[in-house]
Amino acid sequence: MSNQKPTAPWKSKLHEIIYEADTPAGKLFDVALLFVILLSIVLVMLESVDYIGTTYFNIFDTLEWVITLLFTLEYIARIVCVKNPKAYIFSFYGIIDLLSTIPKYLSLFIIGSHSLIAIRALRLLRVFRILKLTRFIGESTNFGRALKRSRVKIAVFLSFVLVLSVILGTIMYLVEGNKDSGFTSIPRSVYWAIVTLTTVGYGDIAPVSSLGQFIASLIMILGYGIIAIPTGIVTSEMTKSQRNKIPKNTQSCTNCMASYHTDDAEFCHKCGELLNHE
């Protein structure tokens, strides 16, 4: 039998609104929150423009204080409506929320800290919950696992690319080294080879001889094929993990803050806490 203490009704309702996006109230709250975050970011960007920042300083300052107070109240509400406040405070979103709130207060004591408000852009990650893109969040988890499983293959591939860059860079140095083309050393030529293989092409170094241009053309074509290889490796691993895909929602545990429980889950998959259900 469980000895868990029941959560006060108002706390359960507040938790449902603030932490979950599967209900109309929760979605409305998150949409409003994102709007305020975007407004705050726009204000910071506009304020950095000298003419606009000077002309409308008082308006920007007032709006920023209003937004900061709203975020402060939201941060407090998030702590109040969970059974284990530390789980939220030290979570990824908890730290981001705190860092997004304190810059305006710090600006009263530390000059220049106001610009840190731009860190609020990280809070836009909540858009995944609002748009019910939890399946893509799950995909990002699968992507991370696929990368981990593919790390040996990718490491071997990157080692091959590095060796190939050294060889190609040395060849280009031998071909273009005596000409006024920028290939002044092997390291600089290797740098050019890497830039060319990755199809970045800054254009700061370019071959001038016919042979050098021919070799460069081959390297450019080779670059397109090389870019596709690691993508194929990771995609193969992700395809394997798709077979075990389980539908999940935005249900959040009031005790440990764990999210993305299965649709039919009654208890938290991490701590066993009873989940809120209507």
Image (cartoon, helix red, strand yellow):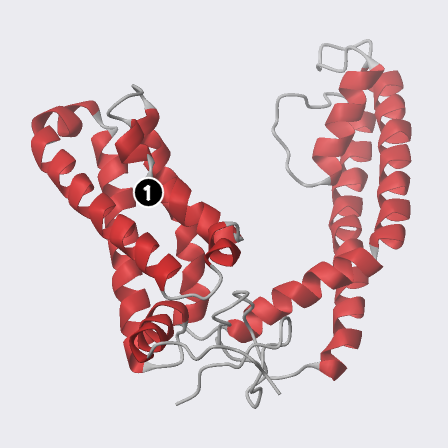
Secondary structure beneath dot 1 equals helix
Answer whether residue 38 is visible to the viewer in this image. Answer: no
In the depicted view, which residue is nearer to us: 80 or 40?
80
Residue at the image point whose x is 72% and y is 35% from the top:
196
Relative to 31, residue 102 above or below: above
Residue at the image point whose x is 37% and y is 71% from the top:
15
**Other residues around mark 1 within 10 Å, as few (<14) / some (14–19) / many (≥20):** many
Residue at the image point whose x is 84% and y is 32% from the top:
165
Relative to 111, residue 83 above or below: below
Q: Quadrant of the N terminus?
A: bottom right
Q: Which residue is mark 1?
A: 101
Q: Amino acid at mark 1?
A: Thr
User: For residue 167, which quarter of the picture?
Assistant: top right
Q: Quadrant of the C terminus?
A: bottom left
In the depicted view, which residue is nearer to us: 182 or 85?
85
Residue at the image point whose x is 75% and y is 62% from the top:
145
Relative to 179, residue 165 above or below: below
Image coordinates for residue 62, horizontal then vertical, percent: 11, 38
Q: Is residue 189 left or right of residue 138?
A: right
Answer whether residue 91 is visible to the viewer in this image. Answer: yes
Image coordinates for residue 149, horizontal then vertical, percent: 83, 60
Q: Is residue 26 left or right of residue 144?
A: left
- Total number of numbered labels? 1
Q: Is residue 102 left or right of residue 151?
A: left
Image coordinates for residue 207, horizontal then vertical, percent: 73, 23
Image coordinates for residue 6, horizontal then vertical, percent: 43, 80
In the depicted view, which residue is nearer to us: 125 or 173?
125
